[in-house]
Amino acid sequence: MKPGLELPPLERRIALPDMIAYAGATWDWHRLHYDPVYLAPRGLDLPVVDGQVFGALLAEQVQDWIGAAGVLRTLKFRFKQLVYAGETVRCVGTVTAVDGGLVTIEHQVLAGDRVAVAPASSTVELR
Amino acid sequence: MMTDEIRALIGREVTYTAPEPLGRAAIRYFALAVGDHNPVYTDDAAARAAGHDGVIAPPTLICETNQYAGLPADADGYAGHTWGIELPGTRQVRGGNAYEFHRAVRPDDVVTATWRLRDIAERTTGAGQPMLVFTSRATYTNQDGDLLATNEETIIYLGVTP
């Protein structure tokens, strides 16, 4: 484990049914995420993916990688650009520091050639 | 954009306690919706093998869900915590989140979320647009007072050119 190590990327297509499921699972029924009547007057052609789901995907990416060898302790991320229904996102991550039992990872979430989420980082406490 | 009235909101605090434990179904539904097939969320044996007492919640679940809030949906359909602030001539956008995970959340945890409005800062975008940046922090605890997680959230009110 040393700086420069790349995590296996996590890729996921987020289609409208997935967004509806996520809205239900998080008790967040904001119309931005599914309602054409709400979207049209706001100049949006497609429902907007709830940005919070990228936190869940980054956590999944880290935990699938570290497994039982560590525990996710922190995760932070800033939104840069919207992602729309039907797009495929790709979570990438690189280890940037290993300090004793604490590993820091810098992430991005990409949607095609757009950066959807950055800067983003997580820390993992090794067991 | 900043006024004394807005500045006076800093320090405001509100607490929500869920009416029931988080529950196994909520955990399974979230993992399914996200597409995270880690068995520690659905299979007690797998969770025990990973050192837990039984299934646990995905770490970001309590930071992303509005399950605890018990609020009615507003006109936009949103049923989560807000500060109820209307700023005419602005557009609201999410800035980001910073989570700290203190211990794995279990189905029998009854979540209390305490939101505190920590700061409101007036800034200017690169394009010269005025904005107000609201920084709030949620602290999630359970019925025994155990600290589960914290969530610092940034919401930006962008000035819209008339």
Image (cartoon, helix red, strand yellow):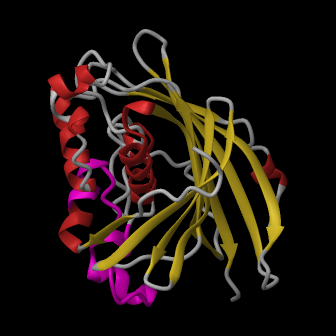
Viewport quadrant of the N terminus of chain B: bottom right
User: Closer to the camera, A124 or B151?
Assistant: A124
Lateral position of residue B25 relative to residue A73, left or right: left
Viewport quadrant of the C terminus of chain B: bottom right
Locate residue B42: give its quadrant. top left
Q: Position of residue A35 (x, y in %)?
A: 27, 75
Relative to A9, is B107 above or below?
above
Q: How many marks?
A: 0
Q: Hey, which residue is sitting farthest top in the picture?
A: B144
The residue drawn where x is 44% and y is 48% is A62
The residue drawn where x is 42% and y is 18% is B142
User: Closer to the camera, B58 or B128?
Assistant: B58
Q: Position of residue A113 (x, y in %)?
A: 49, 85
The region drawn magenta spans A21-49
Q: Hey, which residue is sitting farthest front in the picture?
A: A1
Q: From this viewpoint, is residue B139 visible? A: no
Q: Is residue A20 magenta?
A: no
Relative to B42, is A25 above or below?
below
Lateral position of residue A42 relative to residue B45, left or right: right
Relative to B43, is B67 above or below?
below
The residue drawn where x is 33% and y is 70% is A33
The residue drawn where x is 40% and y is 47% is A65
Q: Position of residue A38 (x, y in %)?
A: 34, 78
Q: Position of residue B74 (x, y in %)?
A: 38, 57
Locate residue B59: give its quadrant. top left
Locate residue B69: give its quadrant. top left
User: Closer to the camera, B73 or B145?
Assistant: B145
Q: From this viewpoint, is residue A12 visible? A: yes
Relative to A55, is B101 above or below?
above
Q: Is residue A24 magenta?
A: yes
